[in-house]
Image: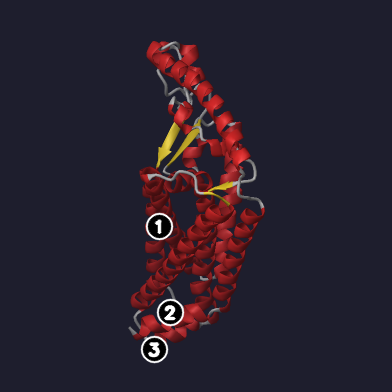
Amino acid sequence: MRLVRAELGRLAARRFVQLMVVLLAAAFGITVATTLAGSHQPSAVEIRVAEERAERQRAEAARWYADCLSARRSGEPELELKYQAGCAELAPDRVDASDFLTGVFVFDRQILDLTYFLVGFLCLFGFLVGASYIGAELTSGGMTNLLLWRPRRMVVLGTKLGTLLAGVLGLSVVSAALYLGTFRLIAEVRGLPGSPDGAFWTDLTATAVRGLLLVLMVTALGFATATLGRHTSAALGVAAGYAVLWEAGGRIVMGIVDVARPDRLMLSSYVIAWVGGEIRLWGLTGDCTGSVGSGSCDPSYSILWPAGLVVLLGLTVLAVAAAFTAFHRRDLA
């Protein structure tokens, strides 16, 4: 317990961590201020006009939805290709009057996108804090001094990682609660809450939980990469190199050589699938997954959240295992 308390104090006392907390709060504050400035309480006239436009749109959507169902039943290639995205997207009940309000923050229509923004900032925070926390110790010789007092490498490194994850998780939970609560309050006083039902709250909760788990995995990856490279800059270099060489450069090369489904090879696809629950992608035109026998061609495919979890968790476990193995064997002098 003394080691855990010491690590908690060391983590909280680091100037970089304190700076990142301030920057995180500033980013959230800017987001809240921007939302407040761009929203207003709609008048009765605005709501009535929006309802009228929504009714007309629902009538159009009902016709499209009926055509889509008919196309699915008929099996006509041209119609199936036209509606390959699926009929659910055309359902009339997806049209809401709030879609036709301008300059109004509607909680149940916009909070999911804002939650993705929250998760992104927390991931950046966790990666940088995780990398610097262990990287600074290895660079400055603080780890060597600590091992003189507690000469059990795996216990020390495991305690550091556990303390880091607990601290980031605690901060992330508090941040998420304040963030979502603030936007709910904005919707009440300077916008509209919408019509959040049980399905909405279930979806929002699942997204938030998956986002928090992603933050922990990204934090562990930053910690493990810096441990393997023995420096904070090693983790930053690996992250930047992957983004530039593979996510950007790899896509260009695979587009040139006509790789059928390049997105399956990108880590970002699995991140989006995990947080959002699913990501729908498109391969080459000739990469058919639809009813080929009827002559139609559907190049779309989906990656679901279980696949995202397997890839992300597998990568995290491998990186952490490699970091502990290297730390156990290397000379720290």
Q: Which residue is mark 2?
A: 8
Q: Measuring 37% from the left and 83% from the top, which residue is drawn there?
A: 3
Residue 13 visible here = yes
Q: Earlier in the sequence, mark 1 or mark 2?
A: 2
Above or below: residue 105 compared with residue 182: above
Q: Measuring 36% from the left and 45% from the top, which residue is drawn there?
A: 198
Q: Earlier in the sequence, mark 1 or mark 3?
A: 3
Q: Earlier in the sequence, mark 2 or mark 3?
A: 2
Number of the front mark, 1 or 3:
1
The amino acid type found where label 1 is placed reads: Leu
Q: Secondary structure at mark 3?
A: helix
Q: State the residue lying farthest toward the front.
A: 44
Indicate the position of residue 210 as horizontal and vertical percent values. Answer: 40, 53
Q: Nearer the viewer, residue 187 or 311?
A: 187
Q: Nearer the viewer, residue 118 or 37?
A: 37
**Count of numbered badges drawn on the protein:** 3
Number of the front mark, 2 or 3:
2
Q: Which residue is mark 3?
A: 149
Q: Which residue is mark 1?
A: 213
What is the CA distance from the residue labelled 1 to the residue labelled 2? Answer: 21 Å
Indicate the position of residue 205 as horizontal and vertical percent values. Answer: 39, 52
* Label 3 environment density (alpha carbons within 10 Å; few <14, some 14–19, many ≥20): few
